[in-house]
Structure formats: structure tokens, C-alpha cells
Image (spheres, rainbow, N blue to C red):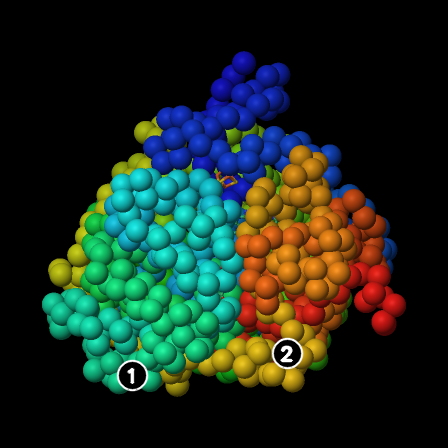
Amino acid sequence: MEIRRSYCGLCHPRCGTLLHIEDGKVVKITGDPDHPITQGALCERGRLMLDHIYHPQRLNYPLKRVGKKGEGKWQRVTWEQALDEVAAKLANLKDKYGAETLTFTHGTKRTYHWDCRRFFNLFGSPNTCGVNTICMCPSYATEYATYGGMVMGSELLGAQCIVLWGNNASKSSPIGSYPKILHARKNGAKLIVIDPRRTKEAETADLWLQIRPGTDLALMLGWIRHIIASDLYDHEFVANWTVGFEELKAAVEPYTPEKVSEITSVPADLIIEAANTYAMISPAVIPFGLGLDKQGVNSTQCARGRAILRAITGNLEIPGGDVFTLAGEIGKIHDAEYLELNHLIPASQRAKQLGSQEYPFFGFPGWERNSAANKKLPKGYAAAPEAWHSNLAHAREVMNAIITGKPYPVKAAITLANNPLLALPNTQHVFEALQALELYVVMEYYMTPSAALADYVFPASTTVEQPELWLTPGFCMSCPQGIEPLYERRNSYDFYRGLGVRLGQEEHWPWKTVEEVYDHCLEPVGLTFQQLVDQYGVLGKREYRRYEKFGFGTPSGKVELKSSIFEELGAAPLPEYHEPKWSPVSSPDLAEEYPLILITGSRFMPMYQSEQRQIEKARKKVPDPLVSIHPDTAAELGLSEGDWAVISTPKGSIRQRVKITDAMHPKMVDLQHSWWFPERDPSLPDLFGAFESNTNMLCPDDPEFCSPEIGSWPHSALLCRVEKEREAEMAS
Ligand SMILES: Nc1nc2c(c(=O)[nH]1)N[C@H]1C(S)=C(S)[C@@H](COP(=O)(O)OP(=O)(O)OC[C@H]3O[C@@H](n4cnc5c(=O)[nH]c(N)nc54)[C@H](O)[C@@H]3O)O[C@H]1N2
Ligand SMILES: Nc1nc2c(c(=O)[nH]1)N[C@H]1C(S)=C(S)[C@@H](COP(=O)(O)OP(=O)(O)OC[C@H]3O[C@@H](n4cnc5c(=O)[nH]c(N)nc54)[C@H](O)[C@@H]3O)O[C@H]1N2
Ligand code: SF4
Ligand SMILES: [Mo]
């Protein structure tokens, strides 16, 4: 038996694995005990990797549509033919309508991403869009504007106080952050959980604030006010390293504990106790939590609020605190932003980005300012803001342009590592748009509901079939390719390079393989990718308080409690709270018809987004989509465990099975997101049941639901009605 090192890329930590190979076939996958970060750990999803590599439903060859769109009729073609035809069609559409006629939808980081952005910059389209508008972008772009970097590395292990704010690490990060939280707890760290559900973390926390969804910003402003009023802030840091303190102080004045309690439903004394705990214990961290990014109207300012809290309590860039360094040697490595070639897209094309009219901080205007501030610092001091993270077109505006041709025709789209029908809100709108495209190209592992609407589908290689250089602000890690790609699966670099060279971009794709790209990236530190793999691939050491040398990567060089970039772009430079559009407070009439508060998408194992639905062992654990509901509420509605329920919002209705749990507040329900059924009919109208239990059929994306700064839409803090399935059917 041969054993080869590789990695699991089924989610973000890229855990180290060992592939046990017999007769050229992987027969077992175990965790790599020598991996310097993950040390042999694999989660229950990672243990399903083998089923994924060899799954009979995997796409193994390029396909071209031969029937009508969504009819499920395909012809196998060669890579050459598929790339030739797609490139020719793109060239034609570009001639007719301009480069901006091509869009792209992306999901959360599964694969390289910089290759996509490179291709789009060279093609000349500013219109890549996707889920980042609600995942990371509010945090990432806003933290850059506030202090010139994104905290990806909350130092959980050394923290003495951990605030899990809209973050359910036990389910969302079982190998990444959760074990560190447990370790810190053993060492005496305090834990504060701010979550409307009684999560596993909430059950064991020192303080649990059961907040009303969507009101977190009010709580943050209340904490800031209390911390300032009680003189609990870090005077030295605030005086030397921040601007806008007095304005901030004035802006938070209205948010007294009593007022915040009224808004958030958290008792005033608990608000004060939690703020005291966070401010008085050092070091303290507030890691990223999607519960904030996905709440729509307040999401961008929540990211500002969290950033301000970290700064005024002196927790930025200290050991055990919230750290965004990219230090020493690894700062020299050519990073993703370098590979994106953002300077090559001309200003005239930048100006056409869809959504940047509506959302002032979004897209190029915000990114250019963040970038310019970053460039004032020595190279590699803080990671340059990546365009794919924080410089996007707005998905709703892109879909509108596809459907209406306004402000200009968008006729072609590429989707890679994304399932837009399941991931984006307002599914019907996305469906209409995907159907209206003249050319739709998808690169995928499996035939998904979105891929089923494509004209061409390309087969993607699994992470164990491709190498990756994983460069995050804290460290650089090599992820070795374990096996040769099976069948005709390829990686995304091969796909974009293949298109690029056919479209006259040859000089910008000099490296034949992605490994050669990584060799180039590592040149400044005198290593090849293979050498990095051989030396067990992690570079980087944390450095702290480096701002003392160079300042922060913001226009003022300080932490901008009042953001000059926001102000310049016409966005609110100081956070202020807005009541969500659908809520018992702002829309009491609607709340009579839709009396329950709806949150969606709280993570659950072993599924990752819309994936694993075809993996038998995963479906055995979670066979059906589940709506979580409190026992009293279920009883009132005549619902028992396992019943099918119909859940409705003013946007539509779906069905999920009832899971009764007192972890829910009686006035709230939580829906699992991204459900479809690979076992169902792949063709229209069923489309793998993509409209039946898909939570995004219920989520709106109209402007009044979105954050005014970047347009992030809500997957939480909404209103709904739940009925037993038969009764709902009879009424309709
Ligand atoms: N209602 C609701 N909606 C949500 C959320 C929520 O909480 N509630 N969460 C949102 C968030 S945070 C996110 S990040 C998004 C997730 O959205 P996405 O990241 O788009 O996730 P998926 O919908 O699973 O689509 C990913 C697709 O890419 C394929 N894939 C995986 N890896 C690769 C690869 O390496 N190469 C290629 N070519 N394909 C690959 C998978 O088979 C899958 O079909 O969903 C968002 N949507
Ligand atoms: N198993 C699994 N793990 C995953 C993923 C997956 O699909 N499956 N997806 C990955 C991705 S892309 C992401 S972005 C992360 C997200 O992972 P997390 O950051 O942990 O986010 P969620 O699980 O979506 O939600 C976290 C918590 O927010 C709470 N919440 C909902 N609305 C609100 C609100 O208004 N205020 C507050 N304070 N809390 C609220 C929910 O109850 C939930 O407990 O998970 C990653 N890990
Ligand atoms: S946490 Fe699990 S799914 Fe994610 S990379 Fe590690 S083993 Fe794979
Ligand atoms: Mo995400």
C-alpha cells in the first residue's frame, strides 16, 4: 500500500490527509498526524471524501447541451471543443455588447478564485458577483476601511475572553476554531455567546445573550456607549491610534442599556455585565460570525461596530487578541491580489460595474480606496485587499440586467464553485435570469440544479486531485496534490487559462500549470512549491503591534472610528441602527400574518452548503431538510416531530420537516438552507426539487432589505408563517 500526503478541501481549514492507495486507487483516507496545523484531525464531512472522489454521479467529461435549456439532454464533447466553442461565443458577445456582458457567480472559497478574477480583468468585465456580498464582504471590506486589514486570525488559543457573536463554531468550524475555543475554556477563558438560538456553545457559556435577530448593531452601540461611559476603554490606544473618538462618543449616546434592551430583548443588566466582561478581560476576541454578515440592512455597520469594539478595548494586534498580520517572510510571497491583475481592467470598464451606483462603498470605489491606503504601507505588511472578496458587482442588479437588458445587456455567465439557485436569495429571480442567458457555462463536481440550466458543463477536479497554495493573513500553507485527476476532470486554472489563451490573453498566462504559478509566487522567498510541500509547508510567524512601526493601512494611518472612506463615498461614517424591514416592530401588520421570526442557514454537519446531498452516508444522517421550532409553538400549530410543514413569507412557500427543540425561542424558527434532491428529476420543471425546500425562495433581496453601503441581503431577521402541510394545502 502506498501512502501519499494530500488535503481535504471540503471546507476552509484544508485539513492535512493521508491517502492510502492500492492498485492506483485511493482505498482509505486518514488525517495526517504530522500536519503542523490540523495534526491528524478530520471531521465527519472530511471522512466522506472517498465517497466524493469516486461518486458515480460525479461529472467526468465536458458536456454540451443538445436539448432545450433544462431538458437534461447532453452530449459528451472534448475539452478542446468545449473551450473552443465557449471562447468563440464569448468573443462574439464581447464584440456585440462589450466585455461587461459577461458575468460570473461565485460561492464561498472552494478553489483558487484569483484565476477567475485574472480572467475577468483581462477580458474587461467588472461584473463578477456572488455570495461574498453577504459572506465576509461586509466584514472584510469594512475592516479594511476601518483599520486596513481583516481579522482572520482571532487568537482563540491565547484569549481570556471569547465573544461568539452570530457564530456557531461547533457546527461551522469543527476542526478550525471549535477545538481552540474548548482549549481556551479549559485554560479559564470566559465565553460570551450572542445568538438567538441556545446553541451548544450558548449552553456552556458564562453569559448567553438571546438577542432578537437583526438587532445586534443596537447591542454593539450599547456596549460601546457603556464602555466609554464607564471609562473601560484603552485610553492610550484610543489617544494614539484612532481618529473620530469624540464623534463616536456622541453617536452612541442614545444607546442606553434600557433603550438597547427594548430593541434587542436582552435584559439591561445582562447587556452591562457582558460589556464589562468583554472590556475588562484582556486579551479578548470577537471572531467573525455569519450571523452578523447575513442580516441584511445592518450587516455592514455591524462589521464596523465589531471592529470599533476590538479597537477601543485595545484588543487589536495583541497576543491572544484579534490579529490581522501578514508578517515577515510570507509578506513577500506574491499573493492572490497580485495574481488577480486588477490594474489591467481600465477605468472605463470599472465604471460599468453593476450595483456600484446603488451601493457607494461597494465594488471598485470602496476597493480602490482600501487598496490605495494599503499601498502606503511596506509591501506585505498587511495583506492587500483581494478583489474577489470585496469588489463585486451586486447579484440582484446583475440578474436584473440579464432579464431586462438594462442598463445594458448581460448575455453570458460563468458559474464555478457555486450553486446560485440555492445560494442566492430570491430564487425565482435568479432562475429567470439563468434561463434568459444566451450563454451559461458551469464548472462543477456534480450536475446541480444550476448546472442543469447550462449550455456547457465542465468537470472539476477534487481538491486531492490538485495542488493549492493557501495564503491567509496568518500563514502560508502548501496543500499537496495527492493523485492525478481522474477521467477528464481539471482544475479551475486550467479552465480559465484554456479560455484566456483562446481569447488573446496568452501573454498573461505564461505558466502551463497551477503548480508553476505557485513556484512563481514563492520565488521571493527562494522556494518552489514542491520544496514547500517537502518542508511541510507552513510559513509565517505572528508579529504583534506592528502598527507602532508603520501605522494602519487607512487614509489617516490610524484606526478610523469614523470612517473617512465611508464619508467620502456618501455612506454613514458612524454606525447607526435601523430596524429590519420585516419585523414585529417595523411591520406589525405583516407580523400578524407572518408571526414568527425567521432565521436561516445555521450550519449543520455533515453538510456543507448545498453539497453532500448525493452522498449516501451524509443523507443517512440528515435525510430531509429540517425546520427547527420550539415545543410550545409546535404544539400550538399542531405540529409533531417529523411532520412536513409549509413555511411561508410574502415571497413564497416551501416545505421542510419539523424538528422540535427548545433551543429555539418560541417566537422564532430556523430553516436549513440550500436543500435540493439529486435523486429527483434533473429536468424542468422539477429541476432536482430545487424550488421545493429551498430557503432562498423565501428570502428577499429588494433594496429596502439590503445594507445601504454594500447591498448585502438578508438570510436572517425575517418574518414567516408555519403550518402543517395538509392544512396549508387545503387553505390554498
Ligand atoms: N438561506 C441562506 N442562504 C445562504 C446562506 C444562509 O445561511 N442561508 N449562507 C450563504 C453563504 S455564507 C454562502 S458562503 C453561500 C454558499 O454558497 P456556495 O458556496 O455557492 O455553495 P453551494 O450552493 O453549495 O455551491 C457550491 C457548488 O460548487 C461545487 N464545488 C465545490 N467545490 C468546487 C470546486 O473546487 N470547483 C468547482 N468547480 N466546483 C466546486 C459544489 O458541488 C456546489 O454545487 O450560501 C449563502 N446562502
Ligand atoms: N457544517 C457546515 N459548516 C460550514 C458551512 C456549512 O454550510 N456547513 N459553511 C461555511 C461558511 S461559507 C460560513 S460563512 C460559515 C458560517 O458559520 P457561522 O459564522 O458559525 O454562521 P451560521 O452557522 O450561519 O450562523 C451562526 C449563528 O448565527 C445565529 N444567528 C442568526 N441570525 C442572527 C442574528 O440576527 N444575530 C445573531 N447574533 N446571531 C444570529 C444562528 O443562530 C447561528 O447559531 O460556516 C462555514 N462552515
Ligand atoms: S474541517 Fe472537515 S471538511 Fe473541512 S477541510 Fe477539515 S476535514 Fe475537510
Ligand atoms: Mo459563507
Q: Residue furthest right?
A: 730
Residue occupying image coordinates x 57% and y 48%: 604
**Image location of residue 665, percent across then percent down:** 55, 62
Q: Is mark 1 within 8 Å of ligand 2?
A: no
Q: Dot 2: few (<14), some (14–19), or many (≥20) neighbours within 10 Å?
A: some
Q: Residue 22 occupies which quadrant of the picture?
A: top right
Q: Answer above or below: position of 19 versus 203.
A: above
Front one among 152 and 517: 152
Q: Answer above or below: position of 597 versus 191.
A: below
**Image location of residue 541, percent across then percent down:** 24, 43
Q: Is 702 situated left or right of 375 in this image? A: right
Q: Residue 240 occupies which quadrant of the picture?
A: bottom left
Which residue bears the numbered disc 1?
253
- Amino acid type at circle 1 is Glu
Check the picture and name the quadrant holding the N terminus: top right
- Amino acid type at circle 2 is Ala
Front one among 288 and 270: 270
Residue occupying image coordinates x 54% and y 21%: 20
Q: Can you see residue 420?
A: no
Q: Answer above or below: position of 499 versus 238.
A: above
Q: Secondary structure at mark 2?
A: helix
**Image location of residue 359, percent across then percent down:** 48, 79
Residue occupying image coordinates x 32% and y 29%: 535
Q: Can you see residue 46?
A: yes
Q: In terms of sequence position, does the residue under pointer 1 or pointer 2 come before the other? A: 1
Q: Secondary structure at mark 1?
A: loop
Front one among 725 and 133: 725
Q: Is 515 situated left or right of 453 in this image? A: left
The mark found on residue 591 in the picture is 2
**Distance from Cα at disc 1 to Cα at disc 2:** 30 Å
